[in-house]
Image: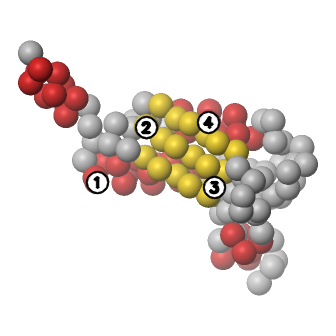
Amino acid sequence: MNSLVQIAEQVDEMSETQTAELKEHLIEALRSVHDPEIPVNIYDLGLIYRLDVDEKGVVEVEMTLTAPACPVAGTLPNEVGRVIDAVPGVTDATVKLVWSPAWTQERMSDEAMLQLGLF
Protein backbone atom coordinates (compact mmCIF):
# COMPACT_ATOMS: atom_id res chain seq x y z
CA MET A 1 0.00 0.00 0.00
CA ASN A 2 2.85 2.37 0.82
CA SER A 3 4.27 2.05 -2.70
CA LEU A 4 0.89 3.05 -4.19
CA VAL A 5 0.96 6.27 -2.16
CA GLN A 6 4.50 6.98 -3.36
CA ILE A 7 3.48 6.38 -6.98
CA ALA A 8 0.47 8.69 -6.60
CA GLU A 9 2.70 11.40 -5.13
CA GLN A 10 5.18 11.05 -8.00
CA VAL A 11 2.41 11.40 -10.58
CA ASP A 12 1.35 14.68 -8.97
CA GLU A 13 4.88 16.11 -9.18
CA MET A 14 6.04 18.25 -12.10
CA SER A 15 9.28 17.84 -13.97
CA GLU A 16 11.91 20.56 -13.85
CA THR A 17 10.76 21.71 -17.28
CA GLN A 18 7.13 21.92 -16.16
CA THR A 19 8.16 23.81 -13.03
CA ALA A 20 10.18 26.27 -15.13
CA GLU A 21 7.24 26.72 -17.50
CA LEU A 22 4.91 27.35 -14.57
CA LYS A 23 7.33 29.98 -13.25
CA GLU A 24 7.28 31.71 -16.65
CA HIS A 25 3.46 31.72 -16.59
CA LEU A 26 3.58 33.18 -13.09
CA ILE A 27 5.92 35.97 -14.22
CA GLU A 28 3.56 36.71 -17.10
CA ALA A 29 0.65 36.85 -14.65
CA LEU A 30 2.59 39.13 -12.28
CA ARG A 31 3.26 41.46 -15.20
CA SER A 32 -0.50 41.99 -15.42
CA VAL A 33 -0.53 43.60 -11.95
CA HIS A 34 0.29 47.29 -11.81
CA ASP A 35 1.08 49.66 -9.00
CA PRO A 36 -1.78 52.17 -9.28
CA GLU A 37 0.58 55.11 -8.70
CA ILE A 38 3.26 54.05 -11.19
CA PRO A 39 2.40 52.95 -14.75
CA VAL A 40 4.69 49.89 -14.60
CA ASN A 41 3.88 46.31 -13.67
CA ILE A 42 5.03 45.09 -10.27
CA TYR A 43 7.43 42.49 -11.69
CA ASP A 44 9.43 44.95 -13.81
CA LEU A 45 9.15 47.53 -11.06
CA GLY A 46 11.18 45.13 -8.93
CA LEU A 47 8.58 44.60 -6.21
CA ILE A 48 8.84 40.81 -6.44
CA TYR A 49 11.87 39.81 -4.38
CA ARG A 50 11.40 36.04 -4.49
CA LEU A 51 9.29 33.70 -6.61
CA ASP A 52 9.69 30.01 -5.81
CA VAL A 53 7.75 27.14 -7.35
CA ASP A 54 8.14 23.56 -6.23
CA GLU A 55 7.43 20.33 -8.10
CA LYS A 56 3.94 20.12 -6.57
CA GLY A 57 2.86 23.55 -7.82
CA VAL A 58 3.27 25.29 -4.47
CA VAL A 59 4.25 28.93 -4.99
CA GLU A 60 5.94 31.22 -2.48
CA VAL A 61 6.32 34.92 -3.17
CA GLU A 62 8.11 37.60 -1.21
CA MET A 63 7.25 41.07 -2.36
CA THR A 64 7.59 44.62 -1.19
CA LEU A 65 6.07 47.99 -1.98
CA THR A 66 7.76 51.20 -3.03
CA ALA A 67 7.23 52.63 0.48
CA PRO A 68 5.87 51.30 3.79
CA ALA A 69 3.12 53.94 3.78
CA CYS A 70 2.00 52.90 0.28
CA PRO A 71 -1.80 53.16 0.11
CA VAL A 72 -2.11 49.74 -1.56
CA ALA A 73 -0.29 47.90 1.24
CA GLY A 74 -3.52 46.24 2.30
CA THR A 75 -4.71 45.28 -1.16
CA LEU A 76 -1.79 44.67 -3.53
CA PRO A 77 -0.51 41.46 -1.85
CA ASN A 78 -4.06 40.04 -2.02
CA GLU A 79 -4.24 40.97 -5.71
CA VAL A 80 -0.91 39.19 -6.29
CA GLY A 81 -2.26 36.11 -4.52
CA ARG A 82 -5.44 36.17 -6.61
CA VAL A 83 -3.49 36.43 -9.88
CA ILE A 84 -1.12 33.62 -8.87
CA ASP A 85 -3.96 31.33 -7.79
CA ALA A 86 -5.54 31.75 -11.24
CA VAL A 87 -2.50 30.32 -13.06
CA PRO A 88 -3.14 26.68 -14.08
CA GLY A 89 -0.81 24.31 -12.23
CA VAL A 90 -0.67 26.31 -9.00
CA THR A 91 -1.87 24.14 -6.13
CA ASP A 92 -1.19 26.56 -3.28
CA ALA A 93 0.31 30.02 -2.93
CA THR A 94 1.70 32.18 -0.16
CA VAL A 95 2.42 35.88 -0.62
CA LYS A 96 4.54 37.53 2.04
CA LEU A 97 5.03 41.28 2.26
CA VAL A 98 8.60 42.16 3.31
CA TRP A 99 10.32 45.47 3.96
CA SER A 100 13.94 44.39 3.99
CA PRO A 101 15.80 45.18 1.93
CA ALA A 102 14.05 48.43 1.18
CA TRP A 103 12.93 48.90 -2.42
CA THR A 104 15.04 51.24 -4.56
CA GLN A 105 14.92 52.23 -8.22
CA GLU A 106 17.90 49.98 -8.88
CA ARG A 107 15.53 47.00 -8.61
CA MET A 108 13.61 48.07 -11.72
CA SER A 109 14.18 46.32 -15.02
CA ASP A 110 15.69 48.27 -17.91
CA GLU A 111 12.29 48.14 -19.58
CA ALA A 112 10.65 49.79 -16.55
CA MET A 113 13.33 52.46 -16.41
CA LEU A 114 12.82 53.23 -20.10
CA GLN A 115 9.06 53.34 -19.63
CA LEU A 116 9.46 55.87 -16.82
CA GLY A 117 12.08 57.90 -18.68
CA LEU A 118 14.85 57.16 -16.17
CA PHE A 119 17.45 56.17 -18.79
Identify which residue, 101 or 20, lies in the foreground.
101
Secondary element at tag 4:
helix
Q: Earlier in the sequence, mark 3 or mark 2?
A: 3
Alpha carbon separation for disc pair 1 and 2: 15 Å
Q: Amino acid at mark 3?
A: Ile
Q: Residues within 10 Å of mark 4 (few under 14, many from 20)?
A: some
**Residue 71 placement (x, y as % from top left):** 89, 43
Residue under label 1: 17
| Residue 34 at least partly seen | yes
The answer to which image quadrant residue 106 occupies is bottom right
Q: Amino acid at mark 1?
A: Thr
Secondary element at tag 2:
strand
* 20 on left or right of 50: left
Alpha carbon separation for disc pair 4 and 3: 12 Å
**Residue 69 placement (x, y as % from top left):** 90, 48
Alpha carbon separation for disc pair 2 and 4: 12 Å
Q: Earlier in the sequence, mark 4 or mark 3?
A: 3
- Residue at image position (47%, 31%) is 92
Circle on res. 48? 3
Q: Earlier in the sequence, mark 1 or mark 3?
A: 1
Alpha carbon separation for disc pair 3 and 2: 17 Å
Q: Residues within 10 Å of mark 1 (few under 14, many from 20)?
A: few
Q: Amino acid at mark 4?
A: Gly
User: Relative to residue 22, is residue 88 depicted above or below?
Assistant: above
**Residue 81 placement (x, y as % from top left):** 62, 36
